[in-house]
RNA sequence: GCGGAUGUGGCGGAAUUGGCAGACGUGCUGGAUUUAGGUUCCAGUGGGCGACCGUGCAGGUUCAAGUCCUGUCAUCCGCACCA
């Protein structure tokens, strides 16, 4: 029976019944952990993106299984989060009810994909048996000082009276009511990811990730080398430090600037400037972060009325506040050098502040101000004439002697704010007791259950705060009355460790068994969207390192190798969206053509990493291809009893060659997630088989059959149900996925290549030998006789043979 | 503004990483099978009658460049006052 969606169901059932994809711990030494980013259970059906991510990563996993790896391939759901809560506010359906229902639908759909997922290890982050251990994770960080509380601003909508996530703020206004969003300071929990900034940066070199992603993380961490320099406030006790990467310009400092939020501001502002300063601070608070960081905005600021003492010259320089200085970067204070910094220059021009040149360009022309490059120092006392780079160190050295400064490395990375004023998330396992203060819930009392019966309509409080039953508890230390933390954890916390829990998902005593996960992890291949390059992937790396340092695991990096799938666009070339009406529903195609055709099209029609616009044309091409494979199998079965040769003669050479090439190409390409070319190799093989079948009258049936078997195996990762069916038709034992992957013989391939060249060309001519010392070499083009070539090949390992259209162009030795 | 990536037939996309560009597939043209349509099979298909010319554009290195170097344009994506 020709392939259709019915075949899918037949084999899915058989796979489930025989448990063929269950991970066998006995084979841990051959383990391969293959993981896709788990998904959020939205109400909708699986979209093309899911298929693209999960379907084709599964193809990779299937090849690995056939290559003898014990593949661990789990699946689960990132089930907490804002959408379910918003949906509840709109419809009144409880987040837990809608989420669990959505998960059920999605499980069904994922199973219809026919992937090799081992459902025994499924996790849902919103169930107590998972979030219990998310709370445990929080406590580990808390005990080691990596979780702490401090005040931090949140986006606040005064009209809805609620906290907004960044993505709910549109152009500075609330997405729901359009009111102007302001800031509000709340005491919130942070994870000290900055403690790992340097290691997060360094270890990027050790992992096989896309360079682009590493770059994003590198920028995110934002290491910069410079110096911290202390300034005293004139006629007061107060002092502050600035961070600078240009200590060489220290003599050019003509004023200093503090961030408006800097606590020192209140202290040092003079009486006559107080009103202006306070007014300025108020204005700043109104702005959203985006507005404030806009480069196009004109710089503004006010004078505090106080002066700072230059650490070397002793000069008095005015102290200003300005919103172009960020409280969260460096020390929140900068030394302004208007002559050699563009921002300081425009600011100084605007407010008529002194500009003093201290660097001249090295070519002696000076350079127009602001001159921001490196050069030679002038107007800098004993440092005159020294180069910028030398002066950077020399000046700091001088400051160091007086304890006024030191070299310092700064990071842009900020600590991770994990408190969310939301209901649908993991409760924070901390109580506040009048007696004992902040108290961690003992691990044995976990989980802190998320109460079901809570009013989560937005009215200015964390929803949990309104549940007396939840909030009022007893202090685990003194037994007195205590209140719980009303916030929940950022869902990125749930997803920062789920790959660990998969490995030991049924463990009710621990989050995971250390010895076991040290064997099963790290993840060997991680596949998911590039949009997680900065947040999720950085958080997960951090959590892994923190748990390592706490002795819970022994590896440094969670994901050894990472691939980002591209985006499949609508047929019109735009991102698929319901509003644009350009969505493609996988269901229709799967019903019509079967899941294998759909998956194979996704593999064939795009470069996996790039993605691209959907097109119906190529899906027909895949149908045709599948039909050709079926016809080959039919032809083979028909001819099995025919008379046949057993020797290999000239009629067989082409087929054998293409067979070798196909095995080599498909294997390497599938390995590298280049599914489009892998499938192309299979098509070439089909074409060669058709030709052989039509043209060679007395066949070498053994070769014919072997080639078809190889072909089916090469195709099987992309079309598992289809090939399973063919396998059965050929009378072979269940299952093709217990078979071994075809191997190719590199030496034979080289030999065949040369033989084919000889055969077609008669003689080998025009061989160019590239000498080993090719650096300054005249490359030599030598015409060699057959005899010479044989000598040349004798005892040499051949790196590559270049044959174009049957003509041997070059043989390159190793 | 800074940083990164990409640019190849009518279209989707290849090119063993410096080796006869355009694999594979679509589409198109012609032929065969079929009562016919569809299906299927085979052949042709970058441009030019030609020698030749062709990988965004202009230079360069090399026996050999889509691939390496310099400059430039376009599109996309990150970051965006980071001191």
Image (cartoon, coloured by chain):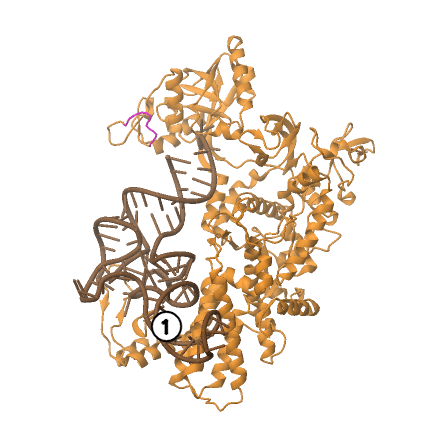
Q: Give how far across and how far down residue A765 sits, in percent.
A: 25, 75
Residue A242 image point, x, y percent: 47, 26
Q: Which residues are magenta?
A: A367-373
Judging by the rendered image, the residue that carries numbered circle 1 is A797
Q: Residues within 10 Å of mark 1 (few under 14, many from 20)?
A: few
Q: Main secondary structure of the magenta part?
A: loop
Tell me the subunit letter for badge 1. A
Look at 32% across and 76% down and name the residue there. A793
Residue that sits furthest to the top in the current view: A272
Residue A512 at least partly seen = no
Q: How many marks?
A: 1
Quarter the N terminus of chain A occupies: bottom right
Occupied quadrant, residue A74: bottom right
Height in image: A278 above or below A201? above
Q: Secondary structure at mark 1?
A: loop
* Residue A447 x %, y %: 76, 44
Say if residue A462 shows up in the picture.
Answer: yes
- At 51% from the left and 42% from the top, the residue drawn is A198
Q: Is residue A811 left or right of residue A620?
A: left
Question: What is the quadrant of the C terminus of chain A in the image?
Answer: bottom left
Chain letter, colour brown in render: B
- Chain in orange in the render: A
Given residues A549 and A464, the one toward you in this image is A464
Q: Quadrant of residue A117?
A: bottom right
- A72 magenta-colored: no
Residue at position x 50%, y 78% in the image? A632
Q: Nearer the viewer, residue A727 or A234?
A: A727
């Amino acid at each position: 029976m020709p392939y259709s969606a019915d075949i899918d169901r037949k084999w899915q059932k058989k796979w489930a019944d025989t448990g063929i994809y269950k991970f066998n711990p006995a084979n841990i030494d051959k383990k391969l952990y293959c993981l896709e980013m788990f998904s959020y259970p939205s109400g909708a059906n699986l979209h093309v993106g899911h298929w693209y991510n999960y379907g084709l990563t599964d193809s990779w996993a299937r090849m690995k299984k056939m290559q003898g790896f014990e593949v661990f391939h789990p699946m689960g759901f990132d089930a907490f989060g804002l959408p379910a809560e918003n949906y509840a506010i709109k419809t009144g359906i409880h987040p837990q009810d809608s989420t669990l229902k959505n998960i059920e639908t999605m499980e069904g759909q994922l199973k219809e994909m026919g992937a090799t997922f081992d459902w025994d290890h499924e996790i849902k982050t919103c169930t107590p048996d998972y979030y219990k251990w998310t709370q445990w994770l929080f406590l580990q960080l808390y005990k080691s000082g990596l979780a702490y509380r401090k005040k931090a601003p949140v986006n606040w909508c005064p009209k809805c009276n609620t906290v907004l996530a960044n993505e709910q703020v549109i152009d500075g206004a609330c997405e729901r009511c359009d009111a102007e969003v302001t800031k509000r300071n709340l005491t919130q929990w942070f994870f000290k990811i900055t403690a790992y900034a340097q290691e997060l940066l360094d270890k990027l070199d050790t992992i096989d990730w896309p360079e682009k992603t590493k770059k994003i993380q590198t920028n995110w961490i934002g290491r910069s080398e410079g110096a911290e320099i202390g300034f005293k406030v004139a006629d007061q006790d107060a002092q502050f430090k600035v961070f600078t990467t240009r200590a060489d310009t220290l003599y050019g400092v003509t004023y200093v600037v503090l961030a408006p939020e800097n606590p020192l501001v209140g202290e040092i502002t003079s009486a006559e400037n107080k009103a202006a300063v306070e007014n300025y601070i108020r204005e700043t608070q109104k702005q959203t972060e985006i507005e404030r960081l806009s480069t196009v905005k004109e710089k503004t600021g006010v004078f505090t009325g106080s002066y700072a003492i230059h650490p070397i010259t002793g000069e008095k320089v005015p102290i200003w506040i300005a919103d172009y200085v960020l409280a969260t970067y460096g020390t929140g204070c900068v030394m302004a050098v208007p002559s050699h910094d563009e921002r300081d220059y425009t600011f100084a021009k605007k407010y008529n502040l002194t500009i003093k040149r201290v660097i001249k360009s090295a070519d002696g022309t000076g350079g127009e101000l602001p001159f921001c490059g490196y050069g030679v120092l002038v107007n800098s006392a004993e440092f005159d004439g020294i180069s910028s780079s030398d002066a950077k160190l020399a000046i700091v050295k001088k400051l160091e002697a007086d304890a006024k400064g030191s070299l310092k490395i700064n990071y842009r990375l900020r600590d991770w704010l994990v408190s969310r004023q939301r209901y649908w998330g993991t409760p924070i396992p901390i109580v506040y007791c009048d007696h004992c203060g902040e108290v961690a819930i003992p691990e044995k009392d976990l989980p802190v259950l998320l109460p079901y019966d809570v009013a989560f309509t937005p009215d200015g409080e964390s929803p949990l705060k309104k549940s007396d039953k939840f909030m009022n508890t007893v202090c685990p230390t003194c037994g007195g009355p205590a209140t719980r933390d009303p916030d929940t954890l950022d869902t990125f916390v749930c997803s920062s460790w789920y790959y660990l829990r998969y490995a030991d998902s049924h463990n009710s005593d621990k989050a995971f068994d250390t010895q076991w996960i040290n064997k099963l992890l790290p993840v060997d291949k991680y596949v998911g969207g590039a949009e997680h390059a900065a947040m999720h992937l950085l958080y997960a790396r951090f959590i892994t390192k923190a748990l390592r340092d706490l002795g819970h695991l022994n590896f440094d990096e969670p994901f050894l190798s990472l691939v980002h799938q591209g985006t499949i666009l609508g047929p019109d070339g735009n991102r698929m969206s319901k509003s644009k009406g350009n969505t493609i529903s996988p269901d229709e195609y799967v019903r019509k053509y079967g899941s294998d055709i759909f998956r194979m099209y996704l593999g064939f029609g795009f470069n996996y990493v790039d993605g691209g616009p959907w097109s119906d044309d190529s899906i027909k091409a895949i149908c045709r291809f599948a039909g050709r494979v079926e016809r080959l199998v039919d032809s083979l079965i028909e001819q099995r009893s025919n008379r046949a040769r057993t020797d290999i003669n000239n009629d067989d050479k082409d087929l054998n060659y293409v067979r070798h090439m196909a095995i080599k190409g498909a294997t390497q390409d599938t390995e590298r997630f280049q599914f489009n070319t892998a499938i192309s190799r299979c098509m070439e093989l089909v074409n060669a088989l058709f030709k052989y079948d039509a043209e060679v009258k007395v066949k070498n049936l053994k070769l014919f059959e072997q080639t078809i078997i190889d072909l089916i195996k090469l195709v099987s990762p992309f079309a598992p149900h289809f090939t399973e069916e063919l396998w059965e038709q050929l009378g072979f034992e269940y299952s093709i996925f217990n078979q071994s992957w075809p191997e190719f013989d590199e030496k034979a391939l080289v030999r065949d290549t040369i033989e084919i060249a000889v055969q077609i060309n008669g003689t080998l001519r025009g061989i160019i030998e590239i000498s080993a010392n090719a650096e300054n070499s005249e490359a030599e083009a030598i015409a060699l006789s057959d005899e010479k070539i044989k000598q040349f090949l004798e005892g040499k390992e051949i790196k590559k043979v270049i044959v174009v259209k049957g003509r041997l162009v070059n043989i390159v030795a190793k």
